[in-house]
Image (spheres, rainbow, N blue to C red):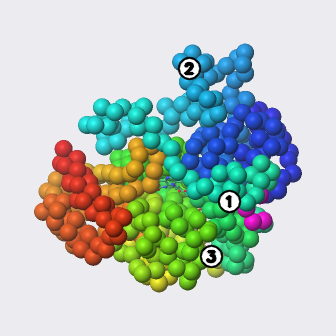
């Protein structure tokens, strides 16, 4: 910690943020939202900026942590701190330490060089400029997440909102799968950016966590077939920055960069991203019925507030969408998900069959068995063509897709397209691919042939065609 070693005995639910503030009294790092949304808790772990609120302290065991106190002192400030003072960058000062780290590392983030052209500001966005876009960063939180409405004392520094769990660190994939098989209430934990968020709200309450961070699954390798094999633990930042991905699978790099924040991408893993759970507001609100969270309890979104939710492929039991951007790119790339079972049995699940439609079992998101560990994602030989990812969202800074389009378009106009933000899984249709040369209208007609939007989300239908048209125009240009 800031160049010093500390041996601490902590409740294993303690986040890195609470460890810093409550146990080491390093209060420069701030607790804002406590759910990965504001960046006030940003610190460096092994030189990478991350959200300390969504990281268990035990996941940073033996790693180098740098907080704002370790960056500079009032008399010997880091140049970025000096710049904040000189240019009056403090605002109220609360999240300033997080912003200093964000600024310091944003320019060094390899994933951001150079900006994919579709993300450069243009038209009205350019006229508004960065400052205006950042003004929309605020995201509403349910009232019960405010201090006076919380069930537990968030300042206890013991992860008091989480149910107690036991913990083990696996050293081989089969051992990890076996550990989950042994305990019916066990779960794997990778980056933890989704699982911990849900554990804090008691939406997930595993009694045992099997840490897969020590498995040697963090490589991106060429396959004999001419494709790529991406280890399950490859972080989203590393995947987006990989030169082979940027060159041959640019749609994947662009989708990753359109998702989450730099801090989250530094922790989030390939497997964890595929398995992140829906962002349906009722799924997050434990006071409301939700078939996905509590099977058979009902769906509050049907007849409720469904603005963000599915327009196609939904059921009478659930109209949630899958939130991943990466998965949409994987779908258009025809990826395969490699897995291992406790007995060592391996299989590859085509990405088309990996995520499920809700049907009457919306609590089951994928066709993965509970004790089946993802070891890698494989990409076939590069498909060539122009790769485009476009994401329509409520604000320019990180937000989940209302509609997204991943497209690979060849010179002759043929290609493939997948949609995000509209269904329970990345949405692709062979007939839409076949119709692509006829243009966005024809392809959209196939993609949304069975669409059943609600009154709240019917507005999503026109942007599908418009976004696809823009993607096709971008590919042609
Ligand atoms: C504020 C915020 C904004 C976000 N915005 C976006 C966005 O715009 N777009 C987007 O795509 N995502 C977004 N995300 C989600 C983020 O990308 C995910 O939280 C992240 O990818 C999850 O990866 P992880 O490694 O942290 O998974 P974890 O939280 O560790 O795990 C997630 C799930 O995967 C399981 N799991 C993990 N590894 C394995 C494995 N090898 N085999 C089997 N099961 C495994 C875990 O048991 C758990 O159920 C956002 C998140 C936050 C908090
Ligand atoms: S749409 Fe799905 S996740 Fe949302 S409340 Fe209904 S059942 Fe739950
Ligand atoms: S406290 Fe807001 S991102 Fe961690």
Q: Residue at x 16, y 53 (%)?
A: 411
How busy is the neighbourhood of tag 1: few (under 14 within 10 Å), some, or many (20 plus)?
some
Crowdedness of circle 3 by 10 Å Cα count: few (<14), some, many (20+)? many
Q: Main secondary structure of the magenta part?
A: loop
Mark number, residue 371? 3
1 vs 3, front mark: 1
Q: Earlier in the sequence, mark 1 or mark 2?
A: 2
Q: Residue 142 falls in which quadrant of the image?
A: bottom right
The answer to whether residue 97 is left or right of residue 130 is: right
Question: Taking 174 as reference, is 35 above or below it?
Answer: above
Verify whether residue 36 appears in magenta: no
Rendered location of residue 462, percent (x, y) = 24, 59
Check residue 355 in the rendering and tell me which mark sits there, or answer none.
Answer: none
Image coordinates for residue 409, horizontal then vertical, percent: 23, 56
What's the CA distance linking mark 1 and mark 3?
23 Å
- Counting from the top left corner in percent of width and height, residue 55 is at 67, 51
* Residue occupied by mark 1: 200
What residue is at 53 percent from the left and 67 percent from the top? 282
Callout 3: helix, strand or loop? Answer: loop
Q: Callout 1: helix, strand or loop?
A: helix
Residue 5 appears left or right of 453: right
Seen from the viewer's position, the closer of residues 414 and 436 is 436
The residue indicated by pointer 2 is 88
Question: Do callouts 1 and 2 mark residues in contact (Cβ within 8 Å)?
Answer: no
Measure how far apart labels 2 and 3 are at the Cα level.
Answer: 52 Å
- Taking depth in this image into account, of 241 and 227 the one nearest to the observer is 241
Occupied quadrant, residue 183: bottom right
- The span shown in magenta is 160-164
Q: Position of residue 398 (x, y in %)?
A: 46, 47
């Amino acid at each position: 910690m800031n160049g010093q070693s500390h041996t601490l005995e902590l409740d294993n639910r303690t986040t890195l943020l609470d460890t810093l503030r409550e146990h080491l009294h390093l209060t420069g790092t701030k607790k804002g939202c406590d759910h990965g949304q504001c960046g006030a808790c940003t610190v460096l772990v092994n030189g990478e900026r991350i959200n300390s609120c969504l990281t268990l302290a035990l996941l940073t065991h033996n790693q180098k942590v740098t907080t704002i106190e370790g960056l500079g002192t009032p008399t010997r400030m880091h140049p970025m701190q000096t710049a904040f003072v000189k240019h009056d960058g403090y605002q109220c000062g609360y999240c300033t330490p997080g912003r200093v780290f964000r600024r310091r590392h944003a320019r060094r983030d390899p994933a951001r060089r150079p900006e994919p052209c579709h993300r450069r500001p243009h038209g009205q966005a350019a006229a508004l400029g960065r400052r205006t876009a950042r003004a929309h960063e605020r995201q509403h939180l349910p009232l019960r997440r405010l201090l006076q409405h919380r069930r537990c004392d968030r300042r206890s520094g013991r992860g008091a909102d989480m149910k107690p769990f036991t913990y083990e660190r696996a050293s081989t994939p089969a051992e990890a799968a076996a550990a989950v098989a042994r305990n019916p209430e066990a779960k794997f934990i990778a980056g933890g950016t989704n699982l911990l968020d849900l554990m804090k709200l008691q939406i997930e309450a595993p009694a045992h966590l099997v840490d897969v961070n020590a498995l040697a699954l963090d490589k991106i390798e060429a396959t004999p077939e001419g494709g790529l094999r991406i280890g399950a633990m490859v972080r989203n930042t590393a995947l987006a920055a990989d030169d082979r991905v940027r060159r041959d699978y640019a749609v994947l790099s662009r989708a990753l960069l359109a998702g989450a924040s730099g801090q989250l991408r530094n922790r989030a893993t390939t497997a964890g991203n595929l398995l992140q759970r829906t962002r349906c507001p009722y799924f997050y609100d434990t006071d409301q019925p939700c078939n996905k969270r509590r099977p058979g309890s009902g769906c509050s979104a049907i007849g409720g507030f469904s603005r963000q939710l599915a327009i196609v492929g939904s059921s009478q039991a659930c109209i949630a969408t899958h939130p991943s951007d990466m998965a949409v790119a994987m779908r258009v790339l025809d990826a395969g998900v490699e897995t291992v079972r406790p007995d060592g049995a391996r299989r590859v699940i085509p990405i088309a069959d990996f995520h499920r439609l809700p049907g009457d079992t919306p609590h089951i998101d994928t066709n993965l068995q509970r004790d089946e560990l993802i070891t890698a994602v494989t990409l076939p030989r590069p498909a060539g063509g122009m790769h485009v990812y476009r994401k329509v969202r409520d604000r320019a800074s990180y937000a989940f897709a209302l509609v997204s389009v991943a497209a690979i378009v060849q010179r002759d106009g043929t290609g493939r397209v997948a949609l995000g933000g509209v269904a329970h899984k990345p949405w692709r249709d062979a007939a839409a691919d076949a119709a692509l040369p006829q243009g966005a209208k024809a392809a959209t007609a196939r993609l949304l042939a069975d669409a059943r939007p609600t009154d709240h989300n019917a507005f999503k239908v026109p942007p599908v065609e418009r976004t696809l048209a823009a993607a096709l125009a971008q590919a042609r240009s």
